[in-house]
Amino acid sequence: MPRDSAKKRRAKPRRSWLWKSVGAVLAIAIGWCGYLAWSVGSEFEGRRWDLPAQVYAAPLELYAGRALPADALAAELRRLGYREDPRLPGPGTYRLGLGRMEIATRGFDYAGDQEPERLVSLAFANGRISRISEASGGTAALVRLDPLLIGSLFPAHGEDRIIVAPAEIPPLLPEALKAVEDRRFDTHLGLDLRAILRAALVNVQAGEIRQGASTLTQQLVRSYFLSNERSWARKIEEAFMAVALELRYSKDDLMHAYVNEIYLGQDGARAVHGFGLASQFYFGKPLDELELHELALLVAEVRGPTYYDPRRHPERALERRNLVLRLMADSGLIAAAEADKAAARKLDVVDSTRRSATQSAFLSLVRRQLAADYPASELERTGLTVLSTLDPAIQSAAEGALADGIAALGKKLDLDGAVVVTTPQTGEVRALVGGRQADVEGFNRALDARRQIGSLIKPAVYLAALESGRYTLASVVDDSPIEVKLDNGDVWSPRNFDGEAHGPVPLVRALAESLNMATVRLGLDVGLEPIRDVLQRLGLAQKPPLYPSMLLGALALTPIEVAQIYNTIANGGFRAPLRAVRNVVDEDGKVLQSYPIEIAQAIDPATMYTINQALVQVMERGTGRTLRGQLPADLVVAGKTGTSDDLRDSWFAGFTNDHLVVAWLGADDNRPIGLTGSSGAAKIWARVLPALEAHSYDAPPPAGVETAWIDYGTGAPSAARCTDAVQLPFPPKAAPPRAFNCEGATGLGARIRSWLRHDGGE
Amino acid sequence: MSARADGRARRRKCAQRKSAATAALVVLLGALAGCASLTASSPAPGPAPVPAPGAPAPGEPPAPSAPSPPSRPQSDAHAASEALLEQSRAQRAAGNNTQAAASIERALRIDPNNAALWVELGEIHLAAGNRSQAASMARKALTLTAGDAALASRAERLLRAAGSG
């Protein structure tokens, strides 16, 4: 258009230069205005769809028999933003009684599975839910709580929002915004001339810009273009765009956009936009459940979320909130008494970083799993809902275990670590901690720290030995100095961690005590290739070169890769790909993608069962026995320690019936940390354990497995009544015969060996 | 090993011996009956025949009069997972295999060592044509059925039907 009008004017050469200039300026101005109107309009339209995917934790399942004390459930409910209210006024409230609890649950749709709102009454006994009854009568087998929103897949250093639909906006909110920010919103055309004149007067008197007169529409425009510039030119542009928006859209549309758009806080790299997210960020619950004093605080934040940050400047925030309440009362929105009552309340802001930034490590796993199926643009813009596998209680316990565990080790500050918790049978990742400062987004050690795994590799060596058919757990292998000639001519002479040689030992003891020389001798006899094959079947994605040092774990893996391998071990030899996502659902609730449980048999169940019984011995008699005292006496667990050369890495992988926990400790610069697997990572694991509903590892023996008693120290046949006898599984007909006395096992020689036995290696 | 663990192991061993003979018989008969019933029903598309919970599968010999004691105690979540199993069967009968599978997965999350759930999920996979998952789940179930011969034979049948038995 500008070019057209310029041509016409050129056709009339008698016009003076003045007219030409005016025409040109006018044309440019019209073009500029057109451009502004177009850009603000496209921004307005575009923002409606610019929604990062929302990620939810796994919903909490309540059923009779579940080990969940009332106080732990109340903590979960508070995490979900449920309020304790004896009147149970509506969904999202609960009431505590003696040995019982009543909950008004929220209804929700879980990937097409409807969970209705319910009023249920729970009875507790001995730390368990003993009965769940419905208010409408009858017992309920199962009640599911709405899943916790754990975050969004917003762009790095970007904005995050939770879009609220018009129906979800409390009616009081727009009224309060108008009363406080823009009294004439309903009638003005984007600009409030009276307010501008008044502000101008104040500013002229003061000699500087002190008072603003921005309408809600102007604030919306400013938010779209993220400009803090206060120049006159910028203001004129904004004013024009505000008018352009008003001409095109209804007041309701503008208010809805404002509620979802306005900047209300900062959470690390994440800008908190819109009242939906702000409600979660400050109060941990949805917008429509806010009480008056909470709603007023959000309205107060509009004026300056940094200056009025309720966490950093609570007194300023409180003062402004109460001003908002007074203005609301003055405009007749609420009664004066109501305002006074709300003004007497505390800010009630939830503990910040702990709830919102914490799961960032887990969210990156979610992002990686989805990256295969969705481009980043789709995850960040199209309003998807992601139903994840995270267990918020385990996550927060694992975060605490790592932070407190490292502090308790009393090491220098550069010690850091990672924790991964999975459910072996389903492959679901229940928690993931990427560092001791879980609330700080940064290097995610659980996914990206690639470190030597040390003795964690040994179960693969022993699995390959059993698979060869030439060994059982009672087979004896020599734990004495060994020299291995390498291809490059060097000689490798591995030593035990304790520097001792233990002579002939049965496989079970060599694995439980993590004896290096015995393992190298065994591994060389079995062959490196079958061992690598076992590792790959267990879930190792890479194909490591075949060096003898592999036998002692000269193989660098990330904690999540270790978790995949041990998940197969804990799952009885069935590989279940680790998953962080169950479903992806679109804006209309349609399931776009499901990631179902998938398993594949990787190791013969009998062979896996046999090695797992040896891993139980790790905890009973081997390198993990120092933890025994910290665990419940009747809890059977299986595990393996790992330590890399010069004590640079401390690993532990341990499992019960329902959970695998992999813990790693190390320094980011790979310096020695002076910790073994059992003196470091195993202690982190022991701290996570109480948060898991731990059931003893009690896999039933697979068909065809025979059991026999052997002497733990020598591998000789033994019997239940003999000291140091251990009952182990064997393949059919390969079990040692039953000993008729204990002499064979605990004769003088064996007894001396047993006395002389030193604490094992790593 | 602690006395408690010893006792548990001994019980297991006894249970194994006691049930070995009956299990062999049941597996043999079950195998024959199972083959017959599967070949008979396989040409008909649609949901697989749904045995009523607890009732023996069609053509299967009745359970031995003295039932072998279960080698594992029922899990805390047993009642809840039973309810989901029923829900899943209703969904399957209504032709909604996706939701039926989702219900079983939900049950497995709270009761992951329940062999009946793995067999059920494997049967749903088989009905959906996913033979490799059906076979894997039958194998998984077989590692967890100790002491439950009827369930073991149902898993065996699933494994054969999946074509990898």
Image (cartoon, rainbow, N blue to C red):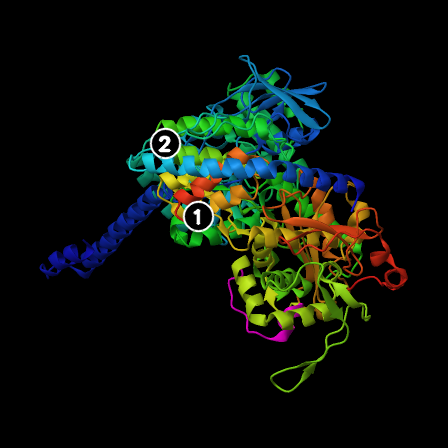
Dominant secondary structure, magenta: loop
Read off the residue under disc 2: B96
Q: Residue A102: where, in percent of width, then height?
A: 62, 19
Image side of residue A422 versus residue B54, left or right: right
Question: What's drawn in magenta, residue-wise?
Answer: A539-552
Mark 1 residue element: loop
Q: Pick the residue in front: A362 or A86.
A: A362
Q: Pick the residue in front: B72 or A271.
A: B72
The numbered mark 1 sits on a residue in which chain?
B
The reply to whether residue A301 is visible in this rendering is no
Mark 2 surroundings within 10 Å by alpha-carbon count, few (fewer than 14), some (14 through 19), many (20 or more):
some
Cβ–Cβ under 8 Å for marks 2 and 1: no
Mark 2 residue element: loop
Read off the residue under disc 1: B165
Relative to A691, residue A452 above or below: below
Residue type highlighted by circle 1: Gly
- Magenta-drawn stretch contains B164: no
Q: Residue A185: where, in percent of width, then height?
A: 40, 30
Q: Are marks 2 and 1 on the same chain?
A: yes
Residue type highlighted by circle 2: Asn
Q: What is the spatial separation of the Cα atoms under label 2 and label 1, in whole angstroms?
A: 27 Å
Mark 1 surroundings within 10 Å by alpha-carbon count, few (fewer than 14), some (14 through 19), many (20 or more):
few
